[in-house]
């Protein structure tokens, strides 16, 4: 059916403005559609035209998605860029004894996520009230400044302070996901979020490379930086500056080119209607179930990510693979590349055919096998079966990364369960706030459990792998609580809500 022109709208000919790059994600899935007589406040020309909300066939706004995907690089680059040098920085700049470095390293890494968790809902509410674009620009600029300042720290307390401040400006991760949703339709959201996931994986790769390549530049590149006393006095400043270039350039591109996607509606019948509170949103039907599934999937991923490099480093008699740093880096890179390809190539195709529930069910079947094969590879090495080890471990590292499709699937579940586009920012903030809380706890808990299993030879050093396998098997039970409106193929769900 063709959309009708709003009464009282300015005459622009017989046609209605065609959808542009700000078509919202949930326009067709809102239970109570906005009356055509509703007025739409528009502060500038970038606001979405209400007629565009009903167009499910809008093409992917490629330039907008590219800019938002670039902005999504910021958080993983800022988080992971310090990993290669944080231990030596704590030791040299903080003056901490070597035996205590591990504690403070874990503390600083966790504080970023812990601070994120505390402010995530604030940024979500701010984006719902004042607009996505200003919140995105402010948070990007804040991360740029705090990331640069971290490398200039001259004491441990400064490192902790700047790391916490970087976490405060975590509105980026909330706002980008929300704006991607609002630039999507049910037909394009799987493809768009595969681009987003690919970009974040690229950030996971670039962050450690930047940190490892540019720390102590006066020693590594004496002809270029050796004569500058600044880089002798601040050997960790350059990786901070280079990392800060990503959010700084994203600030300018977002401020200039990204279009506002928040559609501010005010009905004539309910001009003073209060927005849904956080508590009301959490208690909305299906929200709690989706949040639980979302964070259960993230918990599995965090546990594996925390112990996988340690497992590859651990000696064979203690239950590991005893690989060299070069091979560890190779397998980490190959896994990251495979994960990106699964998300970019396979996920949109699979989601279109089986929907969110089908993708998570697929991952629930693969995940226990993926986790169980890694400790089995230790048994191959114990018995001298190296050709079998290299074959099985290599294939498992590539095929098993297909479980990453569950990350994108549960994000789409969060988008689709939102009561309205106006609540999308806060709902994403709640989901990501809980995820940040897990990220502050799960890595340390995982490595501690793994170390306990290795130290006391529990299950031959495979104690934590057994826990992971059991947790992965639990996903098949957890997925059963997925709300009915999110089950089935996307097309059937769309028709069901029409």
Image: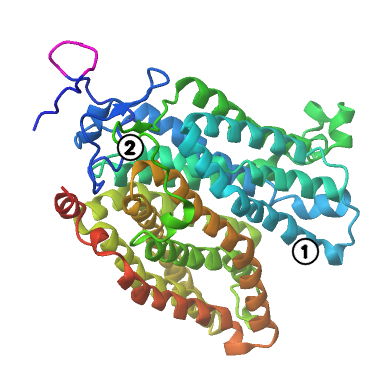
Q: Nearer the viewer, residue 270 or 281?
A: 270
> Left of 226 or right of it: where is 45?
left
Residue 103, by quadrant, is bottom right
Residue 133 is tagged as none
Is residue 315 in view from this perspective? no
Identify the element where label 1 is drawn. Answer: helix
How many residues crowd around disc 2 within 10 Å: few (fewer than 14), some, or many (20 or more)?
few
Q: Which residue bears the numbered disc 2?
A: 270
**Camera-side residue of 433 and 268:** 268
Can residue 484 be seen in the rendering of this structure?
Answer: yes
Q: Which residue is mark 1?
A: 102
Q: Is 350 situated left or right of 134 in this image? A: left
Quadrant the N terminus occupies: top left
Horizontal and vertical percent position of residue 337 = 45, 50
207 to 271, vertically: above or below? below
At 20% across and 11% down in the image, what residue appears?
A: 11
**Dot in front, 1 or 2:** 2
Q: Residues within 10 Å of mark 1 (few under 14, many from 20)?
A: some
Q: Identify the residue at image location x=31%, y=38%.
A: 184
Viewer-side residue, 373 vs 75? 75
Location of residue 207 with respect to 227 vertically, above or below: below
Residue 406, given in percent of the width and then of the height, sits at 37, 60
Tell me if label 1 and label 2 are in contact, CB under 8 Å.
no
Decide whether residue 67 is among the magenta residues.
Answer: no
What x and y, as percent, mark residue 10?
Answer: 24, 13
Whether residue 327 is situated above or below residue 381 in the rendered picture: above
Res 137 → quadrant: top right
Question: Label 2's element?
Answer: loop
Magenta residue span: 8-15
149 to the left or right of 126: right
186 vs 371: above or below? above
């Amino acid at each position: 059916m063709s959309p009708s022109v709003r009464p009282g709208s300015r005459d622009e000919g017989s046609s209605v403005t065609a959808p542009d790059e700000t078509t919202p994600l949930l326009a067709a899935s809102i239970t109570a559609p906005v009356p055509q007589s509703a007025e739409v406040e528009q502060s500038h020309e970038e606001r979405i035209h209400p007629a565009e909300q009903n167009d499910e066939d809008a093409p992917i706004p490629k330039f907008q998605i590219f800019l938002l995907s670039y902005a999504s690089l910021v958080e993983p680059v800022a988080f992971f860029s310090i990993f290669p040098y944080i231990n030596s920085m704590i030791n040299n700049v903080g003056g901490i004894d070597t035996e205590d470095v591990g504690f403070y390293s874990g503390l600083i890494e966790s504080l970023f996520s812990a601070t994120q968790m505390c402010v995530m809902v604030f940024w979500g509410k701010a984006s719902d009230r004042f607009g996505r674009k200003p919140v995105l620009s402010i948070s990007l600029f804040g991360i740029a400044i705090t990331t640069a300042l971290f490398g200039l720290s001259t004491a441990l307390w400064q490192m902790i302070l700047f790391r916490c401040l970087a976490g405060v400006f975590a509105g980026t991760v909330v706002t980008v996901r929300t704006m991607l949703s609002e630039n999507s339709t049910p037909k394009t959201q799987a493809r768009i979020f595969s681009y987003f996931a690919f970009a974040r994986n690229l950030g996971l790769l670039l962050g450690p490379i930047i940190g490892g390549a540019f720390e102590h530049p006066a020693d590594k590149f004496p002809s270029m930086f050796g004569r500058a006393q600044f880089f002798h006095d601040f050997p960790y400043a350059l990786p901070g500056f280079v990392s800060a270039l990503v959010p700084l350039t994203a600030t300018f591109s977002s401020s200039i080119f990204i279009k506002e996607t928040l559609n501010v509606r005010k009905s004539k019948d309910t001009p003073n209607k209060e927005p849904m509170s956080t508590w009301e949103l959490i208690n909305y039907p299906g929200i709690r179930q989706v949040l639980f599934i979302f964070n259960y999937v993230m918990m599995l991923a965090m546990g594996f990510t925390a112990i996988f490099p340690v497992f590859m480093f651990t000696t064979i008699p203690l239950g590991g693979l005893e690989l060299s740093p070069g091979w560890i880096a190779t397998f980490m890179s190959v896994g990251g590349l495979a994960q990106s390809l699964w998300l970019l190539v396979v996920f949109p195709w699979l989601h279109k055919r089986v929907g969110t529930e089908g993708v998570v069910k697929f991952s629930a079947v693969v995940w226990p096998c993926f986790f169980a094969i890694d400790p089995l590879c230790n048994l191959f090495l114990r018995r001298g079966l190296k050709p079998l080890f290299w074959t099985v471990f290599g294939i498992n590292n590539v095929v098993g990364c297909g479980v990453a499709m569950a990350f994108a699937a549960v994000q789409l579940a969060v988008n689709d369960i939102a009561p309205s586009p106006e609540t999308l920012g806060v709902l994403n903030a709640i989901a990501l706030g809980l995820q940040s809380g897990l990220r502050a706890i799960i890595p340390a808990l995982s490595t501690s459990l793994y170390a306990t299993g290795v130290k006391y030879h529990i299950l031959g050093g495979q104690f934590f792998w057994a826990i992971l396998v059991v947790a992965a098997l639990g996903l098949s039970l957890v997925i059963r609580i997925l709300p009915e409106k999110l089950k089935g193929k996307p097309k059937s769900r769309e028709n069901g809500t029409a």
